[in-house]
Amino acid sequence: MSRASQLLARPVVAVSQAGWLFPFQGFWYFCSHPYLWPLLKGRLLPCVLLSVFVLANLFIWTYLPQVAFLYLFHRAGAWVNGTFLVLGEGAAIVAIIFECFFVDETQVDIFDAVLVAKGYEDLVTTRRPVAADGDDPVKRLGKRERHAVYAPFNLRQIVEFVLLLPLNLIPVAGVPLFIFLTGYRAGPLQHWRYFKFLDFDRKTRQRYIKEWRWKYTWFGTSALMLQLVPVLSMFFLLTTTVGSALLVVHMEERGNPVEDDEGPGYIDDPPPQRQSYGTLV
């Protein structure tokens, strides 16, 4: 490739690797790779029905009271802000229910299968066995480890979400600011399992997140926007998991900035060897 071609290609590459784009890439990858579709079987209908039920009740019982309250701050914009507020509340409620009872193990399988398909079995085998041969990455996955978690969900996240809700009272900028800050907090949680693969302790995890902070922030913001889509929020939750795995591939190809920053003069105990469950014959 000529020098001129390389210069012209840089903007295209930069856009294709932008953090906000990975959730959309995950959607396209999911739709174009049939091996992932069986993981949605038995989940799609409950997801849709639950989303419809939750949103219908929120709009019937809470929409007008919230719009009336927001009118004190936004006037004509209260209807728009109230809509986003109810959609955000609905997405949070549905996510809590499904991540606690239905979806998390499916997300684990989706995340692991995409990494296997991309040739990163060495990461996945730190937590579960992977068959050596096979064309179907999902079928190559062995039994999940006990209490496998894709992304943690705890009381702190609920408190943070509630504390950020008043941002919606700010005229014009309130809703974008709420979505951005929520994405800032949620983005790194999408790689909780990846950090487990790498056996990161809390300090190392924080350093790694700092190196990729903006990538994680835009990823989380874009993912949250997709989850605000009525009825399809849980479907996008699963396709965003694919995007999260693709982001891992992107990061792995560029090396570990935490290790790179240590430099040749860094002295410390050697890192522990990754435990591997190996491959299944």
Image (tube, rainbow, N blue to C red):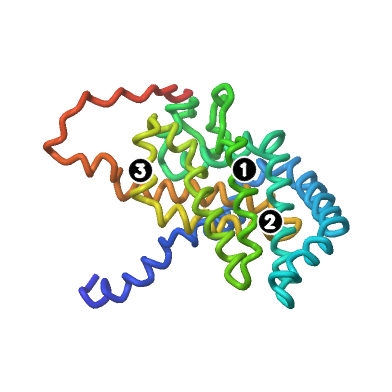
- Residue 117, percent from left and from top: 48, 43
How far from the left and from the top, in percent, is residue 121? 42, 35
Q: CA distance from mark 3 to mark 1?
A: 25 Å
Q: Amino acid at mark 2?
A: Gly
- Residue nearest the viewer, comparing 228 with 157: 157
Q: Is residue 194 above or below residue 232?
A: above
Q: Cβ–Cβ below 8 Å for labels 2 and 1?
A: no
Q: Secondary structure at mark 2?
A: helix
Q: Residue shown at 41%/47% (left/top)?
A: 249
Q: Which mark is residue 159?
A: 1
Q: What's the residue at 47%, 32% (across, down)?
A: 133
Residue 208's disc number: 3
Nearer the observer, disc 3 or disc 2? 2
Query: SS of the residue at dot 1?
Result: helix
Classed neighbour count for the residue bearing mark 1: other residues with Cα under 10 Å, few (<14), some (14–19), many (≥20):
few
Q: Quadrant of the N terminus?
A: bottom left
Q: Quadrant of residue 259?
A: top left
Q: Nearer the viewer, residue 42 or 189?
A: 189
**Residue at image coords 69%, 41%:** 96
Nearer the camera: disc 3 or disc 1: 1
Callout 3 secondary element? helix
Mark toward the start of the polypeptide (2 vs 1): 2
Q: Position of residue 144 (x, y in %)?
A: 56, 26
Q: Earlier in the sequence, mark 3 or mark 2?
A: 2
How many badges with numbers are in the image? 3
What's the residue at 41%, 67% (across, down)? 15
What amino acid is at disc 1?
Val
Q: Residues within 10 Å of mark 2 (few under 14, many from 20)?
A: many
User: Which comes before the other along the chain, label 3 or label 1?
Assistant: 1
Amino acid type of the residue that numbered disc 3 sits on in the rendered structure: Tyr
Tell me the CA gap for discs 2 and 1: 15 Å
Q: Which residue is mark 2?
A: 88
